Image (spheres, rainbow, N blue to C red):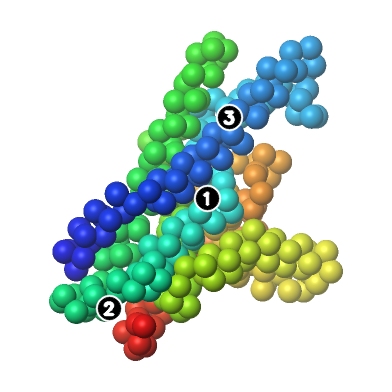
Amino acid sequence: MLGSYRAELLKLRKRSAVWVLFGAGLVLSLIFGYLLPYLGYVSGDDNPQTNGVPRAEVLRGVLPERVMDNTIGGFPVFAGALALVLGAIVVGGEYTWGTLKTILTQRPGRGTLLGGQLLGLLTMLAVWVLGIFAACALCSIGIAAAENAPMDWPSAGALLKGLGGGWLVLSSWCLAGALLAVAFRNVALPIGLGVVWILGIETLLAGVVNSLLPDLHVLSDALPGTNAGALVFSVTGMSSADAPPGVRDAVSGDRALLTVLGYAAVFVVLAVVTTRRRDVS
């Protein structure tokens, strides 16, 4: 397992797609978390409100005290979709290129190989989360210095809680992508199905349930995206008015945590069982 894990880390470090996806998530976080709100704040010098929100509150949203909101606020939807793509590319690429059979003939078992891949992915996602947090923190510091605003940071416990919750959300989506890649033994179909589910189907289903079928809330509240959004809402403590798309208090934080962990465990078990029982070609 350790050898497969090290080999996977080496491949991930040298694979350009990994860093392109990370760059896309980083740019999205900075644009929607800092650039657009700050431009709205600066352009409204003569207006006490920006789109109905007091300018002071707009500025507060890009200061260090709200750094965790901006770091992981997009993880349930946009960054989650990128994490799913990462899992599908890394695991599905071995099928597409025909390299999986070659690797398996050189010694590691199927479960060991997949375990090394998944551990490597989870490690890389931790790097993603820390990288996005560092960039958001630097933006917060820069804006606070430019506006002579206070640099009040969340407590160390709140930061660890937020970073851990964000990592878990990305990990669950990444494991879903890996499972789809194992199931379909390629890259394109898992990416298509996974991204459509995250960006379209869950949102549409939640909207239909809220407006037309309120008795089916139990169904929508059990979906992975709903619980990922509720987990982020819980660990950041943001208000419903400030919450980005996909983040809402649909369920309690404890329930969201257990549900996301449950989905991650199911994804891993199904991927391992499928890999060990089925032909790899």
| Picture layout, residue 254 above or below residue 27 | below
For mark 1, does the 10 Å Cα neighbourhood hold few (<14), some (14 to 19), or many (20 or more) residues? many
Q: Quadrant of residue 208?
A: bottom right
- Can residue 55 be seen from the camera position used here? yes
| Picture layout, residue 272 above or below residue 209 | below
**Along the polypeptide, which appears first: circle 2 or circle 1?**
1
Classify the position of the N terminus by image quarter. Answer: bottom left
**Mark 3 highlights which residue?**
34
Apparent side of residue 10 relative to residue 203 in the rendered image (left or right) = left
Do the CB atoms of the residues marked 2 and 3 lie less than 8 Å apart?
A: no
- Report helix, strand or loop for mark 1: helix
Instruction: Kindly identify the residue that appears in the image at 49 percent across and 19 percent down.
Output: 142
Q: Position of residue 40 (x, y in %)?
A: 70, 24
Instruction: Kindly identify the residue that appears in the image at 68 percent across and 17 percent down.
Output: 42
Of badges 2 and 3, the one in the foreground is 2
Check disc 1 and give the amino acid type.
Ala
**Mark 2 highlights which residue?**
101
Q: Position of residue 156 (x, y in %)?
A: 38, 36
How far apart are labels 2 and 1 at the CA level?
Answer: 31 Å
Using the image as rendered, state which of residue 228 and residue 40 is in the foreground: 40
Apparent side of residue 160 relative to residue 82 in the rendered image (left or right) = left
**Along the polypeptide, which appears first: circle 3 or circle 1?**
3
Disc number for residue 79: 1
Classify the position of the C terminus by image quarter. Answer: bottom left
Hey, which residue is sitting farthest front in the picture? Answer: 97
Of badges 2 and 1, the one in the foreground is 2
Using the image as rendered, state which of residue 66 and residue 18 is in the foreground: 18
For mark 3, does the 10 Å Cα neighbourhood hold few (<14), some (14 to 19), or many (20 or more) residues? many
**Along the polypeptide, which appears first: circle 2 or circle 3?**
3
- Report helix, strand or loop for mark 2: helix
Instruction: Kindly identify the residue that appears in the image at 15 percent across and 76 percent down.
Output: 107
